Image (cartoon, helix red, strand yellow):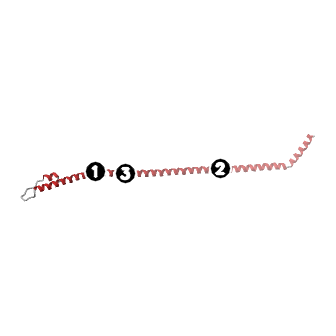
Amino acid sequence: MPLTPLDIHNKEFKRTFRGYDEDEVNEFLDLVIKDYELLMRENKELGNQIGGLQERLDHFNHIEESLSKTIIVAQEAADEVKNNAKKEAELIIREAQKNADRIINESLVKSGKVALEIEELKKQASVYRTRFRTLLEAQLELLNTESWDALEGKLTTDYSRSAG
């Protein structure tokens, strides 16, 4: 158990014949008591300060721990947002590729139909040209035949008769 100023003040010493001067011892003890009281007060104040500082330290440690957890949560959230954005970008790219493939396929089908239509039109034009040539050749042949000359002569004779 620690020594208190009261313990020092109430301390009784045995008296001997050739002992110390009682007044001197009492004066010295009074000085020791004052110094001891001062040291105890300072010690108590320092203890209180240590307690306050310990509370602040605990508070700051708690804040540090909370901040660390917050940073970890924020980092995890940022990673999650980044991963979600990456997945969304991949989905957009895949959708764009599907649309591009669809557009290309539709274009190929349409170009195939147009090519078929062009071929059909070329065939029809060729058939028309052939028929027209055949018709013209038949008409020329008709004009170059003797029956046309005979018909022409008959028309001239019939005209002369009716005019006269």
| Badge 1 amino acid | Gly
Q: Residue 136 vs residue 105: left or right?
A: right
Determine contact: label 2, label 1, CB under 8 Å.
Answer: no
Q: In the image, is 48 to the left or to the right of 129?
A: left
* Lower sequence index among marks 2 and 1: 1
- Horizontally, is 48 left or right of 119 in the view? left
Dot 2 and dot 3 residues touching (CB under 8 Å): no
- Visible residue check, residue 1: no
- Residue at 81% x, 48% y: name it: 139
**Residue 88 - label:** none
Residue at 14%, 55% (x, y): give it.
27
Q: Which of the marked residues, 1 or 3, is nearer the chain's N terminus?
A: 1
What is the C-alpha distance between the residues marked 1 and 3? 22 Å
Circle 1 Cα neighbour tier, 10 Å, few/some/many (<14 / 14–19 / ≥20): few
Locate residue 109 relative to residue 57 in the image: left or right: right
Q: Nearer the viewer, residue 79 or 57?
A: 57
What kind of residue is marked 2? Val
Amino acid type, residue under disc 3 in the picture: Leu
SS at circle 2: helix
Please tell me which residue lies in front, 63 or 157: 63
In the image, which is nearer the foreground, mark 2 or mark 3? 3
Q: What's the residue at 75%, 50% (across, down)? A: 129
Count of all numbered marks drawn on residues in the image? 3
Q: Which mark is residue 52?
A: 1
- Dot 1 falls on a residue whose secondary structure is helix
**Percent position of residue 22, x then y:** 10, 55
